[in-house]
Image (cartoon, grey):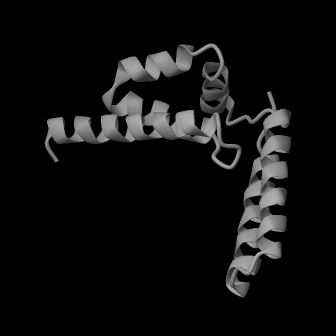
Amino acid sequence: MTRIAALLFWRTLAVICVALGFVGMFLPVLPTVPFLLVAAWAGGKGWPQLEAWLLAHPRHGPGIRRWRDHRAVPRKAKWAASSTMAVSVVWILLTGAPLAVKVGVPLFLLVVATWLWTRPEI
């Protein structure tokens, strides 16, 4: 991969993730911060100005820095994510989803929630 192609790849990934993070600010089913974490990471590889802007952002910058420095997730975010996952599981169980989905998704979300609650809080 040439340098220009790599730069274009990282910038495209960063822009897509910023866009998804922006949409996530208005849709409760789409998380914002994970997309911004990926955007900052990709920006660090191909768009340092975007990375710096994300790290300096007054609302999301502290969360990105907290994750980078300590792999920490605030308790409020853990509760918000866990609540959203619980509502999603109830919704899936009440629909006509296939049995594999009714079993697989809750198990996957349980693993995600367990991982999330084992992260430090700073």
Displayed quadrant of residue 107:
bottom right
19 sits to left or right of 59: left
- The residue sitting at 59% across, 30% down in the picture is 68
Percent x, y of residue 69 = 63, 27
Is 110 or 19 nearer to us in this picture? 19
Residue at image point 75% right, 54% down: 115
The answer to whether one can see residue 45 in this image is yes
Q: Residue at x 60, y 20 (%)?
A: 61
Residue 99 or residue 54, whichever sits in front: 99
**x, y percent for residue 50:** 41, 22
Taking the image as shown, residue 28 lies to the left or right of residue 121, namely left
- Name the residue rendered at 13%, 42% in the picture: 2
Tally the marks.
0
Please state if 83 lies on the left or on the right of 36 as rendered: right
Residue 118 visible in the snapshot:
no
55 in relation to 17, above or below: above
Quarter of the image for residue 89 reads bottom right
Q: Quadrant of the C terminus?
A: top right
Q: Is residue 55 left or right of residue 86?
A: left
Q: Is residue 95 above or below residue 30?
A: below
The answer to whether residue 56 is above or below residue 6 is above
Percent coordinates x, y for residue 80 in the rendering: 81, 42
Estimate the x, y position of residue 101 in percent, counting from the top left. 69, 78
